[in-house]
Amino acid sequence: MANTTAGAKSPVGTLYRGYDGMWSWVAHRITGVTVFFFLLVHVTDTALVRVSPDVYNGVIATYKTPLVNLMEVGLVGAVLYHALNGIRIILIDFWSKGPRYQKGMLRGLIAIWLVVMIPGTYFMLLRTFESLFGSAS
Amino acid sequence: MSSPTLDAPRSSRQLVRNNFEKNAWMFMRLSGIVLVVLVLGHLFIMNILDGGVHRINFAFVAGRWASPFWQLWDLVMLWLAMLHGANGLRTIINDYASKEGTRLTLKGLLYSATFLTIVLGTLVIFTFDPTIS
């Protein structure tokens, strides 16, 4: 029963050092910082509704361009990872079996992430693809 | 380099008057649970549902903020997300900025940006005028 988190054969690595425990933590930090800086930009661009409808519609038009539309997919992917891994962290901290199942929970969250992101990416980019390659209308 | 000091084994725990770090730790988990619902709901409505970002414009915002429900949603999301993110960045600054001056500068910038963004966003939600031209 000793050393259940790192596996019996592994001399190094605990829940948070090395392997998936550490990399999920690194990804949590990177996605968190990314989302926070976007949040500063996003509150500011939304504040332009207090200037005029034209100014607001102008800045929102940049969100509809192909490049920024692609970055939105990245943003949603970052937020979704951060949210799912955050739930995993809470379960590790508060659920008595959380540390034992942390690896399985990481695999589960990656599976959920893919199941949401594949159709999500399709719907987010649909209009951009139509406008770029002109298949519709 | 002096070696790090440890309390003697089984020494009585000192009374911690200001448990800020523990409260911050708990806040990250509690706000996180609420933000999962608020932010993922926000992203789903704004980016995926019914044409996503392509249907957003001033009239769309006016329609949403006509409802106190979405005003409250956005207000709570703004405050929790900003405080959650600011505390996350505070932790990261403490982890990686080793010089006292660098830490103070970065935290000064962080707290200023956080304060200004929360005030700006709150004012916009409360003073929004759909008839502005």
Image: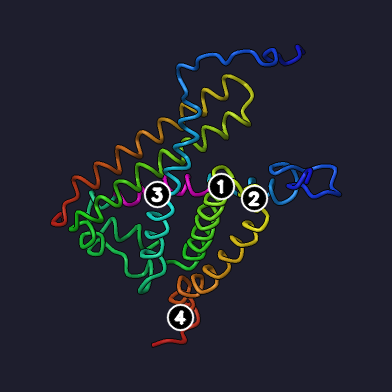
Camera-side residue of B37 and A51? B37
Display coloring: rainbow
Q: Position of residue B35 (x, y in %)?
A: 41, 50
Point out which mark residue A130 bears: 4
State the residue position of label 1: A95
Upstream in sequence: badge 1 or badge 2: 2
Q: Is residue A62 above or below residue B113?
A: below
Q: Secondary structure at mark 1?
A: loop
**Which amino acid does the dot numbered 1 rest on?**
Trp
At a point 32% along the width and 52% down the height, the residue shown is: A46
In depth, the one of A119 and B34 nearer the eye is: B34
Gap between marks 4 and 3, in whole Å? 36 Å
- Amino acid type, label 2: Ser
Of all chains, the one bearing label 1 is A
Q: Which residues are magenta?
A: A34-47
User: Which label lies toward us, 1 or 2?
Assistant: 1
Could you give the CA–CA distance between mark 1 and mark 2, rounded to whole angstroms?
A: 18 Å
In terms of secondary structure, where does tag 2 sit? helix
**Would you say residue A15 sits in the magenta stretch?**
no
Marking on residue A24: 2
The chain letter for the residue carrying disc 2 is A
